[in-house]
Image (tube, grey):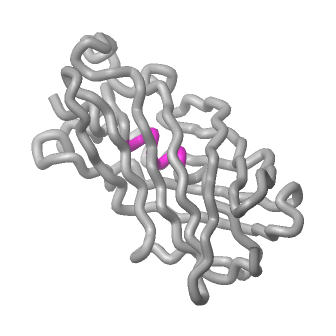
Amino acid sequence: MKLTTTFAGLAVAATAALALPALAQQKLVPEQSEIVFVSKQMGVPVEGRFKKFDAQVSFDPAKPATSKVAFTVDMGSASLSKEADAELVRPVWFNVPKFPQAQFESSAIKALGGGKFEVAGKLNIKGNAQDVVVPVTLTQSGANTVATGAFTIKRLAFKIGENEWTDTSMVADDVQVKLKLALSGVPKL
């Protein structure tokens, strides 16, 4: 099934939360942002995305250690295919009625130089919290700053794909989350 992609989407959403830095007046620019998840179903990469997410960001490039990022992803907005989308909301996958959102909250942001940062924090999906570290690259163009990054989660650690779906020969355990988050109001790097 294409539920593997849904799991990957959840991972991506969680990852996006980790990679998003910004200040008190900073805002996410949703129409220029995306969270994509990629999983493998029977060895074939399948890509999905989350259509609804938000972030609260307070980021100062001169003081990354004092910066904070909080991110929420609407799990019901996961989109893979018409058939898979109907399955993703069910208890065995995302269990959207019980866990409508995935959350990420940063615990540390570290500058690596050259516009690169490492965002560490807790990712909570389906009531299961895991520590994650997301490498993020920031680029500025005009009034916006774009944060891009990718990380991999283990879907089974978040209980995404339960019962017969724990067999990783059908849907791989690894789900790559890729994010591109446009932010307004970030100071010059």
- Kindly identify the residue that appears in the image at 72 percent across and 82 percent down: 25
59 and 87: which one is in front?
59
Q: Position of residue 41 (x, y in %)?
A: 22, 26
User: In what quadrant of the picture does the C terminus appear?
Assistant: bottom right
Q: Quadrant of residue 93?
A: top left
166 and 37: which one is in front?
37
Give the left or right position of residue 143, taking residue 44 as reference.
right
Q: Is residue 21 above or below residue 130?
A: below
- Kindly identify the residue that appears in the image at 78 percent across and 45 percent down: 107
Residue at the outermost bottom position:
142
Give the left or right position of residue 171, taking residue 63 as reference.
left
Q: Quadrant of residue 134?
A: top right
User: In what quadrant of the picture does the N terminus appear?
Assistant: top left
Q: Position of residue 14 (x, y in %)?
A: 52, 45
Q: Is residue 163 visible?
A: no
The secondary structure making up most of the magenta span is helix
23 and 163: which one is in front?
23
Q: Is residue 114 above or below residue 108?
A: below
Q: Position of residue 109 (x, y in %)?
A: 78, 51
Over which residues does the magenta segment extend?
Answer: 9-15
How many marks on residues? 0
Residue at the outermost left position:
83
Q: Is residue 189 above or below residue 47?
A: below
- Residue 128 is covered by the magenta coloring: no
Q: Is residue 187 visible?
A: yes
- Kindly identify the residue that appears in the image at 68 percent across and 49 percent down: 105
Q: Position of residue 128 (x, y in %)?
A: 56, 29
- Kindly identify the residue that appears in the image at 22 percent across and 47 percent down: 80
